[in-house]
Image (cartoon, grey):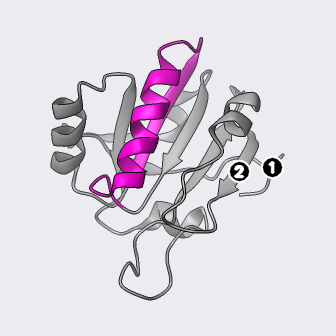
Amino acid sequence: PKVGSKAPKFTLIKSDLSKVKLADFKGSKLILNISPSIDTGTCAASVRRFNKEASELENTKVLYISRDLPFAQARFCGAEGLDNVITLSDFAKGKFGKNYGLTIADGPMANLHSRAVVIIDEKGIVTYTEQVPEIVDEPNYEAALKAL
């Protein structure tokens, strides 16, 4: 989504298999940390980094979004002791990826989400976006955090 636009609505699945919507986070700043899979080194590194940063941020929630099964997301965060990140899965239909323009079109990771960071303010407005050009690269954490 474009900076300055209203964030596209979404419904995703939490680790307990309940549904959560963008509207459920109204009034909070959001860091959407999006990636192809929690089971890649770069994705894991970004979740760890945003988990660390989230512990120091007021009125800010970090949402990790991928097409991994909720069980895999929960397993990773449990094993790593990450409790400042809310894991959300788009496994069923990939609608989030389509609505946010992040679905990988072809290749071995087709239909997964590309690596990206989206910052949304308390009013639901997008204040920052970064779609990482190379899937093996980490996002620009400093720029994302500055947008809060």
Quarter in which the C terminus is drawn: top right
Amino acid tagged 2:
Thr
| Residue 47 highlighted magenta (yes or no) | yes
Q: As drawn, is 89 to the left or to the right of 26?
A: left
Give the label, 2 or 1, closer to the camera: 2
Q: Position of residue 115 (x, y in %)?
A: 52, 59
| Residue identifier under label 2 | 129
Q: Residue furthest bottom?
A: 106
Q: Position of residue 100 (x, y in %)?
A: 60, 61
Q: Separation of disc 2 and disc 1 at Cα?
A: 7 Å
| Residue identifier under label 1 | 3
Q: As drawn, is 137 to the left or to the right of 107?
A: right
Q: Magenta span covers which residues?
A: 37-65
Identify which residue, 136 or 36, lies in the foreground: 136
Identify which residue, 122 or 137, lies in the foreground: 137
Q: Residue, x 63% and y 53% (percent of image)?
A: 8
| Residue 61 highlighted magenta (yes or no) | yes
Quarter-of-image position of residue 15: top left
Q: As drawn, is 24 to the left or to the right of 28?
A: left
Amino acid tagged 1:
Val
Mark 2 neighbour density, 10 Å: few (under 14) some (14–19) many (20 or more): some
Quarter-of-image position of residue 90: bottom left
User: Can you say whether 17 is above or below 24 in the image?
Assistant: below
Quarter in which the N terminus is drawn: bottom right
Q: Position of residue 6 (x, y in %)?
A: 74, 46
